[in-house]
Amino acid sequence: MFSSPTPAPGSRAIASNALRNAGLIERDRDRDATMRDLTDKPGGRKASSKIRSHNRPRVIDINPKRKAALQAGPSDPITIRGGADRLRSARIGGPLSTPRVRTKFRPIEVWRELVRKRWNPDTQFLNLESLIDDELLKKHNLLPPGRGGDVRNAAVIFKLAKELKPTVKTLSLSNNNLQGTHLQCLSHYLPELVNLSLQNNNIRTMKDLDALASRRGRLMSLKELVLTGNPLQVEGMKTDNGEKYRRDISSRFTSLEVLDQVTIAQIGFDRPGPSTAPAQAPTASTFPVEMGPSFITGVDGGLVSNFLVRFFNAMDTQRTLLLDAYDPNATFSFSANTTIAARARAQGFHNTLPNQKKLTWADWIGGGSRNLSRVGTDFDRSLSSLHIGAEDAVKALCKLPGTKHDITGPPEEFCLDSFPVVHGQGMGLLLTIHGQFTEVGTEGLRSFDRSLILMPAPDGSRAKRNGWDVVIVSDQWTIRVLSSHEAWKPGPLLIQALSKEEQAARGAAPTSPPQQQQPLDQGAQTALAAMPEAQRNLVMQISQQTKLNVRFAIECLAGNGWDLDRAIANFEQVKVRLSRPP
């Protein structure tokens, strides 16, 4: 049906030579003998006798595969395994080609060579700029991180850089289109970096730097950082001349001295140089100065007392009433300190008092605690936990657990210091309060520290109309595990808390645990708020010594001409008379 094509002149001779060179047919003694195609039919007796005269078997008869290849015809050399290459070599007169042996290269060896090639040990400088243009990577068809390469390649490069000696101090990663994900392992492998350039990359937000500035991965020795050409730096410089951008970066990298080739202002303190003399163990058990009593200076004590009585009363009963007590631009934050102080641990308050084990920190921490040691570098959380404005401050207060402050209880359980401070363009009053309160619900005791800055309420303001002579412009509240009020008790100030055994050995009376507080009723607080400071202090002292409530303490002092000694003596006489049997 299909006829075989007629071979071209000379094609048989070419095919014959190629097959002989490939070892597929036997070489004749006469190299000029013509190879006959299998389709040829030899004619005449002479031709037949010539073919039959061979005594040795032919290769094509022994090997069926070669025979089948020859049957395909000399004009189809591709059917012969390897024949096409051999024929091509034969045509050009070259030697027979040998198969190529491909060797597999290891990418890590290429990265290692790259790192070593770009390393300057004299200056401890590793230059990894513009890796996309590196000839070594082009040769091996490798894409660097940020230019299509895997993020894992960045970790491999940083790990190889860690092997360099001496330690890498200066690293440039400029012009690599890197993102925050590419920097995740940088501080892990190169924690001692002093100078780092990320110029002209793709750092877009502060979160892209978290891997370098987090608590565990912080570059503690970093002195210079270059971020110019990144979207973060470009956008940051458009607002307030870049002040916020520089402030945020320097707060993340506290050791930084130069940012984008601009020196960062540093706050320094005069201090003596390090001493080589061996340190001696302290022998004193108290500080050289004693703890003084609470003091109020620069302002009438009655103003402070009236404010605190009203403030804590609203704090314990109805916090929405404090809306007028805060300035419209006031700031408020609170911090939950869950650490048990050494003094409290030594005295065992958290185990001996009945309700302490009921206390939990979930509501305080979940309510927006601004404990910066826990917040770390989460700047969004640190900003959201700073409440600005009266409404925001009161709203945050209302979400926290209820409290009960016994501000008219034993005076040694509270410590109040007040003195004028400069605030803005005017003078304010700083109040620092240390004390304790009862948490509503669990009835457990907590210690607290509170710092308030007060300013005079403007005439005609809402606060002034509602009876607040001063308003709060700053409120910082720290809630702590209960500790003894002995820390601010007037007298010798202990360096460390003494256990009960140590107190007994020194002949000192063991510290009594704090008592559960009983809050004053509204009438008692109103009566105290209306009294002068001197009389209020007398009421607190006689209440402490006699355990009289506020109403009877006032009556006792008033009946004795506000003489404390006479009032106490009169109380003892009445007590003895009442104790006698009828």
Image: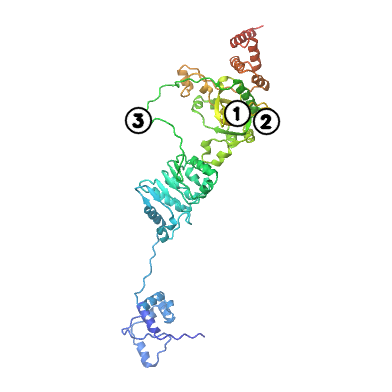
Mark 3 vs mark 1: give the one in front: 1
Q: Amino acid at mark 1?
A: Met
Q: Amino acid at mark 3?
A: Thr
Residue 65 lies left or right of residue 380; in this view the side is left
Pick the residue in front: 565 or 65: 565
Q: Amino acid at mark 2?
A: Arg
Pick the residue in front: 451 or 181: 451
Q: CA distance from mark 2 to mark 1?
A: 14 Å
Image location (x, y in percent) of residue 117: 37, 54
User: Residue 16 occupies which quadrant of the picture?
Assistant: bottom left
Sequence-wise, which precedes: disc 3 or disc 1?
3
**Which colour style is shown?**
rainbow
Q: CA distance from mark 3 to mark 1?
A: 49 Å
Disc 2 secondary structure class: helix
Image location (x, y in percent) of residue 15: 39, 81
The residue singled out by tag 1 in the image is 455
Q: Is residue 32 above or below residue 582?
A: below
The residue singled out by tag 3 in the image is 276
Query: Badge 1 local density, few (<14 within 10 Å), some, or many (20+)?
Result: many
Mark 3 vs mark 2: give the one in front: 2
The residue singled out by tag 2 in the image is 462
Q: Is residue 251 above or below residue 501?
A: below
Sequence-wise, which precedes: disc 2 or disc 1?
1
Image location (x, y in percent) of residue 214: 49, 42
User: Residue 321 occupies which quadrant of the picture?
Assistant: top right
Q: Residue furthest front?
A: 425
Sequence-wise, which precedes: disc 3 or disc 2?
3
Q: Residue furthest bottom?
A: 44
Disc 1 secondary structure class: strand
Image location (x, y in percent) of residue 300: 59, 21
